[in-house]
Image (cartoon, helix red, strand yellow):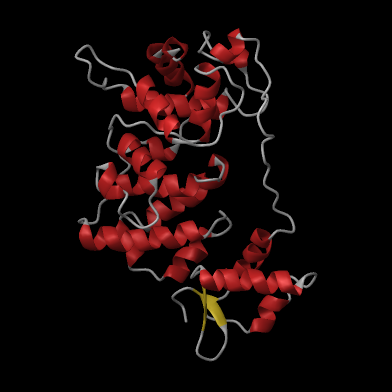
Amino acid sequence: MLNSVPPERLIGWFDTHERDLPWRDPACSGWQILVSEIMLQQTPVSRVLEPWREWVARWPVPSAMAAESAGEVLRAWGKLGYPRRALRLHECSKVLARDHDDRVPEDVETMLTLPGIGDYTARAVACFAYGQAVPVVDTNVRRVIARAVHGREQPGNPSRRDLDDAEVLLPRSTDAGYSRSAPRFSAALMELGALVCTARNPKCDNCPLVGCTWVRLGRPAHTGPPRKTQKFAGTDRQVRGLLLDVLRGTNGSVERSKLDVVWTSDTAQRDRALDSLLVDGLVEITTDGRYCLAGEG
C-alpha cells in the first residue's frame, strides 16, 4: 500500500520536525558525511555529536587522517564503541587520499570497493552527500515500512526486499524518473523512525502517516521471534573496552601487568578479549613484549 507513505505529507512533516544535526549542513563534504555515517552505526546520535565535530575539525579531508597513525585514530575514537570502525575508516582515508583525489567518490559501486564501506553506508553517502535517488535502509526505515506498508509491528530479518520496498516508495516525477525530492524523502523516512515510529512506545498520534496500515489494522502485536536485546555488562565487549581504555590513556606501550589488572574476575575471558584485539589489528605487541595501540609499536 504505497499510499501509506505519501511523499508530500512525509516531507512536509520533515520540514517542520527535522533535527538540526551538524552533518546535515549543505556545506558538509562527502568525507564529513561518511565520518558521521560510520560513527552512527549502532550508536545514538547524542553520543556522536561532539566526537564528529572534533574529528571533522581535526581531519577535514581524508589525507589529514591518513597522515595519522592508526593508534592515534583509535585514541580519538574514545568510547564510541566497536572500534574496528575507526580502524577501517583510517584504512579508507588512505585509499581516498591515494586513489580518489582526497574525496569520497559519488557512485555506490565505487564506494563499495573502499575498506569498511558496506551497502548501507555507500547508499547513505550517495543520497545525503550527493543527492542521489537511491534507497537508504537502516533499522528505522525498516520499521516504518513494516508498519506503514505491511501492517507489521516489527520488520523481519534484513533482506534484499528491504531495499526493493524502499526503492518503490521513492517519489517519482511526471516523466517516470525519480523526483528531485527523493533524497529528502529518504531522510524524512529515517527521521520518522527515529522520532515517532520508534521500536517501543511509538507516538502514533503525532505521525503524519495517518493511513498507516498497522494502525488501521488495530496495531497487531508482533508474532515472530522475540527481539534480541544486546547486553554489555560482563561481556567480552566490555572487557575489550577496558583493555583499550588503558592503551588509549597511554602514549606508547604498556607492560602486560597493566592490562591484567582491569579484569581479574575471569582471567580466561580477559585473555580471550586481549587475543581478539590482537587478531582484529587494534592492538600490537612490541618487540620487547609490551602492548600498544595499532601502529604505535
**57 left or right, relative to 211:** left
Task: Give residue 49's position: percent from left, percent from top.
Answer: 50, 44
**Number of numbered discs overlaid on the protein picture:** 0
Instruction: Please identify the quarter of the rendering in which residue 267 is found.
Output: bottom right
Task: Give residue 34's position: percent from left, percent from top.
Answer: 37, 47
Instruction: Please identify the quarter of the rendering in which residue 93 is found.
Output: bottom left
Q: Which residue does the image show at 59% across and 8% down from the upper left?
A: 216
Task: Give residue 43's position: percent from left, percent from top.
Answer: 55, 45
**62 left or right, relative to 269:** left
Where 100 falls versus 44 (above or below)?
A: below
Q: Which residue does the image show at 73% across and 73% down from the upper left?
A: 268
Residue 249 visible, this orientation: no
Task: Give residue 167's position: percent from left, percent from top.
Answer: 36, 26
Where 78 falls versus 151 (above or below)?
A: below
**265 left or right, relative to 60:** right
Most extreme residue toward the right is 265
Q: Which residue does the image show at 33% across and 68% down from the upper left?
A: 67
- The quadrant in which the N terminus is found is top left
Residue 84 visible, this orientation: yes
